[in-house]
Amino acid sequence: MSISGTDYHFRVKDFFVGAQMLFVAFGALVLVPLLTGLNPNVALFTAGVGTLIFQIITRGRVPVFLASSFAFIAPIIYGVQTWGIPSTLCGLFAAGVFYILLSFIIRWRGTEIVRKVLPPVVTGPVIMVIGLILAPVAVFMAMGKTGDGSAVLVPEKTALIISMISLAVTVAVSLLGKGWFKLIPILCGITAGYIASLFFGIVDFTKVSEAAWISVPDFTFPVWNLDAVLFIVPVAIAPAIEHFGDVLAISSVTGKDYIRDPGVHRTMLGDGIATSFASMLGGPPNTTYSEVTGAVALIKAFNPAVMTWAAIVAILLAFVGKVGAFLQTIPVPVMGGIMVLLFGAIMVVGMNTLVRAGEDLMQARNMSIVALIVIFGVGGMSMPLGEFRLGGIGLAGVLGVVLNLVLPQPRE
């Protein structure tokens, strides 16, 4: 089966290539639900369906796989602790609606309007805040504690050995890995840490033995909460801008201009609908995966139908109950070791956004915007809005947009 005018050719022989694409994405895909308290089987299901939704909206033109977004880890953790999972899902649904509205604006006014409202001097420090605000959570978990540091789950010495093994292997594979291994450093780090955990005897397989082989994922449905909406929607600013970079990256790999055809308004719309769909069932927000783009470049798998197979395999795995139960046996220090690098990397992405823009950060206007975004976000500033409060990353994002629009440009 093929779609006229595209490279989309649905062939059974591409099944194993698609399965490999899911393997590349798997470590990062399940990492987000495991860190935030969401269900990994639901994340697999919504990633698969989200990818199919994206393909339908982009008319089968773009070979990308959609799965769990790292940018939302901090707000999801905070939201689950503050309002619970159903209310947090309401905020995540609204983030998807934000993408959808943005796609309509892009179609109406073009991409320049987005660059004007959300320049690097705003998006860079917002991304930095996402990484920095999570630093204590990563350190606590690497030391064998709960994310808030209130309880010890694994003895500190044991936890540090395991977390540092996870961290070291992840760094080593990302630097020295060849071929497929270079695309799965997170999965390699988790595997190494898990093996070390087995030697220390801290893995409990009770849930795996109790879980059914075939079961419907434990879907959770959103509950309306305006606090969660106001807190989470501004976080969508950063990944919305990253979306442009992801589309440009896959364009350069395949040699096709996806900004023009099917158009970034369609790719953004697909991302938004996939994100809102995921939140309706209890899954994390979706985003295009750069790891899979790297795999596309490595094996020259430019047929978008390969991602259809990856999506189908993800959906099928979601109904294997023992997969989710096994993933939930991964000890806290293993995840903590990965998080130390992951959240630091998010912060570096924000810094790189500023560096590549070439802005003079010592210029008074830029310094004010960047400084206030970072300190408001990392410092935990919050402001009352009637009966509600806006704080953290959300406040940092809104503040950056407002300052960029109201502060005068420097005189030449």
Image: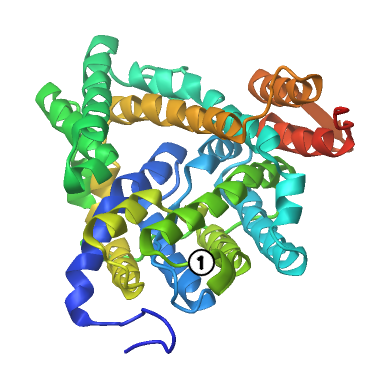
Q: Nearer the viewer, residue 161 or 155?
A: 161
Crowd tier of the residue under label 1, counting other residues whose Cα lies within 10 Å: few below 14, some 14–19, many 20 or above: many
Q: Is residue 162 left or right of residue 4?
A: left
Instruction: Report how many numbered discs are placed on residues in the image.
Output: 1
Q: Furthest residue to the left?
A: 199
Q: Nearer the viewer, residue 299 or 400?
A: 299
The amino acid type, in three-letter code, at marker 1 is Tyr
Q: Is residue 218 visible?
A: no
Q: Which quarter shows the N terminus?
A: bottom left
Q: Secondary structure at mark 1?
A: loop
Q: Which residue is mark 1?
A: 258
Q: Is residue 132 left or right of residue 360?
A: left
Q: Position of residue 175 (x, y in %)?
A: 25, 30
In the rendered image, the vertical position of residue 95 relative to residue 56, given as above or below: above
Q: Nearer the viewer, residue 192 or 3?
A: 3
Q: Residue at x 60, y 28 (%)?
A: 129
Q: Is residue 18 left or right of residue 36?
A: left
Q: Position of residue 369 (x, y in %)?
A: 76, 26
Q: Which quarter shows the C terminus?
A: top right
Q: Position of residue 255 (x, y in %)?
A: 40, 64
Q: Residue at x 56, y 25 (%)?
A: 133
Q: Nearer the viewer, residue 267 or 99?
A: 267
Q: Residue at x 53, y 41 (%)?
A: 71
Q: Is residue 227 left or right of residue 91?
A: right
Name which quarter of the figure residue 333 lies in: top left
Q: Position of residue 311 (x, y in %)?
A: 34, 67
